[in-house]
Image (tube, grey):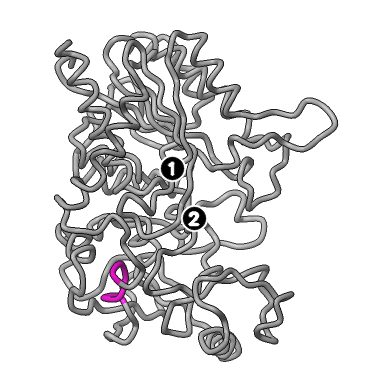
């Protein structure tokens, strides 16, 4: 075990970060995710099909709450000291997001402390902590305001780690969306600055090795998934149609489709929404009148029948805005519809072999309890970026060993 580079993915979601680390040559030990649907997706792809994790016998292969793990398996986690090179992942970001309500007392924010407890028990050599840009912004209030990034940095420094963080725009790393994220690297005995330096220096080389541009646009990402290529009855949803693959039109599409296990013509989770006629009319009006790539609201008065808090018509020649868990925020660049789960997944750089499980959407009170496919994709770390981080850490560790 000591000769391999093992990592643990905590708050793993559906497995975007782990997919990238798999492609970077890391070996997974286990992943912690408490939602049943998100874990089902991770399990199907990375445990059952890729056999990527060397799961320990003491931990059931199922969804798990980190606080339960800390309570019931503290000794098992301590026993991992010196055997785990990397712990990666970040607590749920909704409580910190500038796009959300940013409640200081959001229960999810307390998971940052659980994260630190986990690190204290395992003491990995390297840590990758990912969260939204808002993680660096103080909460508003008369007293007791918190800047959670400082809390994490100080806690890790007390444990003996050197820490460096950057706000990184993943659109510069081949991912076709403007997704700015807080990325913190912490190392015990190494230089986290070198990881960021290596990550930046290798960007062009990496994208060239994949045959893609470092600034992939929307058309290059999803034009082979247009509804115009045809459709068939959805294999997993009665009463819905799913899109048929069109011809590959870019190297990015070729990369995403390269290991696809799809036996038919239909991409996984490429189910079209059954829009009402008035919704189709709204989308047509938006395609006719809305400036592409610009977030518009009802107050802008561009169309008269917009009843959503905001919407963006995608610019085919640019990157998408940040993919979120709300599917009706984005309108296809030429078809009067929202995007499918597979199109969201492409924009997040999930390869087409990666299949999503569970419901497509949920509404009302269930939204706080369930993690349907659109949410799984929106909450994930883009695998293409995670792969580059994983490779940069490997390179820096290799140089450290040669010193």
Q: Is residue 252 left or right of residue 228?
A: left
Between marks 1 and 2, how big is the CA–CA gap? 22 Å
Which residues, given as a range, are shown in magenta?
Answer: 220-225
Image spot of residue 310 (x, y percent): 63, 69
Q: Is residue 71 left or right of residue 25?
A: right
SS assignment at label 1: strand
Image spot of residue 15 (x, y percent): 35, 44
For mark 1, what is the residue?
Answer: 168
The tag on residue 157 is none
- The residue closer to the viewer here, 41 or 6, is 6
The quarter of the picture where the N terminus appears is top left
- The residue closer to the viewer here, 54 or 246, is 246
Say if 333 sits above or below 386 in the image. below
- Mark 2 surroundings within 10 Å by alpha-carbon count, few (fewer than 14), some (14 through 19), many (20 or more): many
Q: How many marks?
A: 2
- 271 magenta-colored: no
């Amino acid at each position: 075990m000591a000769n391999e580079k093992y990592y643990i993915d905590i708050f793993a979601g559906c497995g975007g970060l782990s997919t990238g680390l798999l492609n970077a040559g890391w070996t997974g030990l286990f992943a912690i995710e408490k939602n049943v649907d998100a874990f089902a997706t991770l399990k199907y792809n990375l445990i059952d099909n890729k056999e990527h994790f060397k799961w320990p016998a003491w931990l059931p292969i199922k969804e798990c709450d980190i606080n339960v793990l800390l309570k019931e398996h503290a000794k098992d986690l301590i026993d991992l000291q010196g055997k785990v090179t990397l712990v990666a992942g970040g607590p749920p970001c909704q409580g910190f997001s500038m796009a959300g309500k940013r409640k200081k007392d959001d229960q999810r924010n307390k998971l940052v402390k659980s994260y630190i407890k986990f690190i204290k028990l395992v003491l990995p050599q390297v840590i990758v902590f990912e969260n939204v840009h808002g993680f660096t912004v103080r909460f508003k209030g008369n007293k007791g305001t918190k800047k959670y990034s400082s809390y994490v940095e100080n806690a890790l420094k007390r444990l003996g780690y050197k820490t460096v963080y950057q706000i990184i725009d993943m659109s510069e790393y081949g991912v076709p969306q403007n997704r700015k994220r807080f990325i913190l690297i912490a190392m015990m005995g190494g230089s986290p600055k070198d990881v960021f330096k290596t990550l930046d220096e290798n960007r062009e080389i990496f994208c060239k090795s994949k045959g893609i541009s470092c600034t992939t646009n929307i058309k290059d990402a999803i034009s082979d998934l247009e509804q115009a290529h045809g459709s068939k009855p959805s294999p997993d949803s009665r009463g819905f149609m799913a899109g048929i693959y069109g011809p590959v039109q870019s190297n990015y599409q070729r990369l995403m489709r390269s290991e696809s296990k799809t036996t038919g013509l239909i991409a996984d989770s490429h189910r079209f929404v059954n829009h009402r006629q008035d919704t189709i009319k709204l989308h047509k009006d938006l395609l006719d009148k809305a400036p592409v790539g610009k977030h518009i609201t009802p107050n802008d008065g561009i169309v008269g029948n917009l009843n959503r808090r905001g919407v963006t018509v995608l610019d085919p020649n640019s990157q998408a805005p940040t993919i979120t868990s709300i599917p009706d925020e984005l309108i296809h660049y030429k078809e009067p519809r929202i995007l499918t789960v597979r199109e969201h997944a492409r924009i997040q750089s999930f390869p087409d072999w990666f299949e999503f499980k569970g419901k497509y959407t949920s509404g009302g009170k269930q939204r706080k309890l369930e993690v349907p496919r659109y949410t799984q994709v929106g909450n994930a770390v883009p695998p293409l970026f995670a792969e580059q981080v994983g490779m940069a850490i490997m390179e820096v560790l290799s140089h450290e060993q040669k010193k």
